[in-house]
Amino acid sequence: MTVQQDSINYLTTEKKKLIKEKKMIKFRRLDQMSQEGEEMFRNKEELDRVRAEMSRAMEDIGHLSAEKENVLLKRDTLSQLRAERTKVSQVKDELSQEKHKLNLERDELTQQINKLSQEREELRESLEFIQKFDTFSVKDNCLNKICKPCTGDWILFKKKCYLFYDKPAPWKTWEESRTLCKKRGADLVVINDLEEQEFVSKHIKYYHSEHHGYWMGLQKVNNTWTWVDGRVNSLGFWAKNTVTSPGPKALVIPSQNPSESWKKENNVFMNKFICEHKARLRSN
């Protein structure tokens, strides 16, 4: 009995050990499975995170591809625009050169037109001058078959001819002087500016007395000093500090200052005079 009881006790003890070991193994197994489950869960989360990152990366790649295509399209458009700009610039340069060429041709034609117009006007004036004569003297006006712009004692200045009447006394009144000028196809001189005044002063001479001078085509009409061509006088070359009369006619006297050499005088006063007409004959 004792042996049998001991065997039973031994087996019971072993059984308890086995049951305990089985429970421990089960617990370890469950713990291991729990750890493996947690690791698998962590792996799954990591995998999901990686997949999400890959998805975002793929989206970024898609966006980058679209942007790349957009950049390439813009680059192609820019290249096309540059090519068109270069072409436009070339066309602009060609048009500019053509415009410059046309401007030169226009200027040349304008000069030719002006020259021809001037020649036509000179020919017209020459014809008018010749037609004033019943018989035109080629001998007097065209020495050696070359027509002169001014004849005889007439002096040329800026397309006008001037005659300074310097014959000895008896001299002429203003009216007589103008009549003699008109017989020569001219009129008493009309002063247009200081340059012409200086030219006239250069060719007149002192004679007889300081009160004498040369009649000009300037007279008082309705209390207004007016030139014989109808223009109202706008110049003021009157002599200062000189005895003068309130006469209605004007003469120019020799003076060191051309801008102060005009004098008022009566028509009956006898003086030399200056005639003037356009240079109606062309000079070669």
Image (cartoon, rainbow, N blue to C red):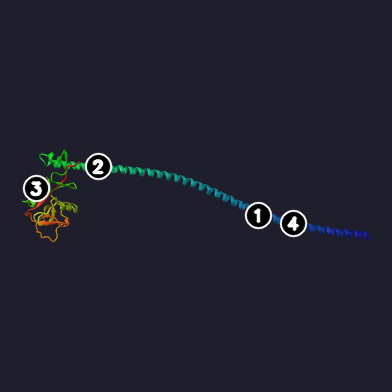
Residue that mark 2 sits on:
113
Q: Amino acid at mark 3?
A: Leu
Q: Which residue is mark 3?
A: 180
The answer to the question of whether label 2 and label 1 lie on touching residues, with beta carbons closer than 8 A, is: no
Q: Is 130 situated above or below 239?
A: above
Sequence order check: which comes first, mark 1 or mark 3?
Answer: 1
What distance separates the C-alpha of mark 2 from that of mark 1? 96 Å
Circle 1 residue: 46
Give left or right: position of 60 versus 151. right
Mark 2 is on which residue type?
A: Ile
For label 4, count other residues whose C-alpha is less than 10 Å away and answer few (under 14), some (14-19) or many (20+): few
> Can you identify the residue that label 4 sits on?
32
Q: Quadrant of the N terminus?
A: bottom right
Residue 100: x and y in percent read: 33, 44
Badge 3 vs badge 4, beta-carbon distance below 8 Å: no
Tag 3 secondary structure:
helix
Mark nearest the camera among 2 and 1 is 2
- Residue farthest top in this picture: 145
The amino acid beneath tag 1 is: Glu
Front disc: 2 or 4: 2
